[in-house]
Amino acid sequence: MLAKFPNMPLEYIKKASIGTSWGPEGVPRGKGGSGAEVVDDKTLGIVSGMMKEIEEGGEARIQKYCLDLDKWTGPIVLTPEEIQKKCDRVPEQTKKDIRFAIRQVRAFAEAQLKSISNFEMDIGEGITAGQRVMPMTTAGCYAPGGRYSHIASAIMSTTTARVAGVKNVFLCSPPKNPEEGIDDAIVFAGHTAGADKILTLGGVQAIAAMRYGLFTGTPADILVGPGNIFVATAKRLSYGAVAIDMFAGPTEIGVIADKDADARIVAVDIVSQLEHGPTSPAWLVTTDEALGKSVMEQVPPLLEELPEPNRSVGLEAWEKYGEIVLADSREEAVRASDLWSPEHLEVQCADLEWWLENLQNYGSLFLGEEVTVTHGDKSSGPNHTLPTMGASKYTGGLSVHKFLKLVTFQRATRDASARMGAVSARISRAERMEGHARAADVRIEKYGLQAQEDV
């Protein structure tokens, strides 16, 4: 007997042993559900302590953390000569692949940039107002390099910031080992995408260095890029003093599939994201019970075929956070998916335009069997830094717009100043803000105009 969703005519084909705190049947954090509502107290204490020490101790304290945590004693900022040596070691095919990905990401970011523009217009009553689109001055980009070398993260953040017109673009990535430093391909990606400086820094010390302008001389206005819980917490603590792309959590995948979907492809796509880590959720919503059961049977053996540690973390994630539900209709499938609001959402169904029009909550949407999350993660063009843990209900992912400020300006004729002054003064006094009212009155008096009662 399949388990029923409360208040929803949906059934589980596979139920997660833990589950998430959001979705059709959220599991409270107190009962083990993962979620974004609070930061772990222990992690918060560690990170806040490190950030304070770095703020007070500066570059010397960062170098001590590099030694203690990464056994790194080499230079923090790569010289042009060091960058060139690393780039020279990258295989030619890898260079070609990275250049391809950069071209795709740049093309999409350039299209996004064209979607917003400066303007100035007469909005009536003698008032002219406008908008200016201005890039931030400095971006701090982070590319993880722990379990995996995130070449694509260097591409996504650095390229997009550069297209936005950011003046200073800095890239941090941890050493992959004490001898080699940053992965050569990450350096090539960052350098080719246009990073002004590349720093051998990982974790909290990387975020703190970019926030405070250590080793670069220029504090970041925005911090972007994925990372582990310590990186995410450092960014969370920095928010307000600087902008950040988003509060990021474990990678997620959602798939909606109908009876004509290829069960093996669905299973392989799910496995591709489970390898990210032991807390990565995966959801399949299907209108076909046979397909759902087939995927459930295929995922574990596919995970068993992966090398370690991918195999172990994937199996743990599938057991704890993997779910398959059976929907009675495509409308119910949309409802369930929107409650999960997955970071990545694949649709392998007929009538793709219907799904595009009706789905609301996702970080990035992959329509049809021909595209998969891996394409988006690595090379297709749209950015792969995306909202997780239900955040796509209210935000999208990293884009050229994140690096831009939309600021406004206004001017008016003296007649308009009188008309606005009368209205503004009355509203101010209705709010009991006499100082505000007098700032409007003084202009009416200076210009010798009569404040109008009717506007």
Image (spheres, helix red, strand yellow):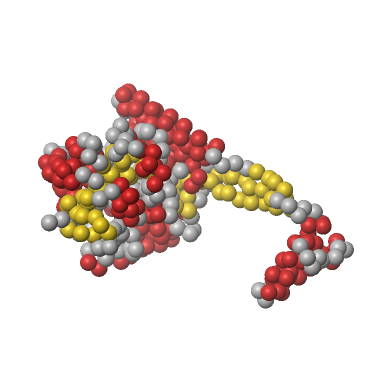
Question: Is residue 265 visible from the viewing direction of this image?
Answer: no
Quarter of the figure that contains the N terminus:
bottom left
| Quadrant of res 73 | top left
User: Quick check: 315 left or right of 370?
Assistant: left
Residue at 36% across, 58% down: 233
User: Quick check: 89 left or right of 106?
Assistant: left
| Quadrant of res 437 | bottom right
Question: Is residue 375 visible from the viewing direction of this image?
Answer: yes
Residue at 33% across, 53% down: 335
Percent across and percent down for residue 405 are 56, 49
Percent across and percent down for residue 119 are 65, 43
Percent across and percent down for residue 240 are 48, 59
The image shows residue 189, relative to residue 299, as above or below, that is above
User: Quick check: 217 left or right of 439?
Assistant: left
Foreground: 311 or 397? 397
Considering every residue shown, the one lying at the far right of the view is 448
Quarter of the figure that contains the C terminus:
bottom right
Foreground: 85 or 163? 163
Percent across and percent down for residue 86 are 34, 31
User: Quick check: 51 left or right of 119?
Assistant: left
Considering every residue shown, the one lying at the far front of the view is 329
Q: How many marks?
A: 0
The image shows residue 100, relative to residue 131, as above or below, that is above
Foreground: 234 or 424? 424
Residue at 32% across, 44% down: 345
Considering every residue shown, the one lying at the far top of the view is 92
Residue at 31% across, 24% down: 93
